[in-house]
Amino acid sequence: MSDTELRSRLQRLRSAPAEDVRPPSAYEAVTRQMVEALAEDLKEIKGRLNGLLWMVAGAIVLDVALRLAGAGP
């Protein structure tokens, strides 16, 4: 593929009209909103779970460090 051919293809892609991605029915619009809300909720849950796992890992490391220093049980 030559440079001019590549440039002409890119120019055609840039000038192509954008496709309409609006949902054709109210049901699909509501479903899309529900899925997007669910994705946001899952993202929040994932963040909280990651924070909890880091806290547990930190507590374990601290406990091991204190036991090695002779301050633990």
Image (tube, rainbow, N blue to C red):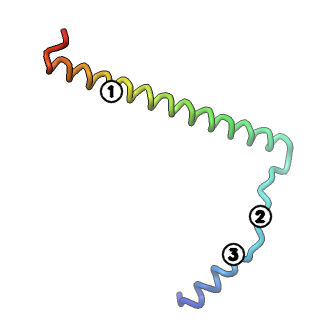
User: Is label 3 in a helix, a strand or a loop?
Assistant: helix
Judged left or right of residue 56, residue 62 is left
Residue that numbered label 1 is attached to: 57
Residue that numbered label 3 is attached to: 14
| Closer to the eye: label 2 or 3 | 3
Judged left or right of residue 43, residue 64 is left
User: Is label 2 in a helix, a strand or a loop?
Assistant: loop
Q: Which image quadrant is residue 29 in?
A: top right
- Quick one: label 3, few (<14), some, or many (20+) residues within 10 Å? few
For image coordinates 63% across by 79% down, the residue present is 10
Q: Which residue type does callout 3 highlight?
A: Arg
Q: Which image quadrant is residue 68 in?
A: top left
- Quick one: label 1, few (<14), some, or many (20+) residues within 10 Å? few
Residue that numbered label 2 is attached to: 19
Q: Please report contact status of discs 2 and 3: CB closer than 8 Å, yes or no.
A: no
User: Is label 1 in a helix, a strand or a loop?
Assistant: helix
Q: Mark 1 or 2 closer to N-term?
A: 2
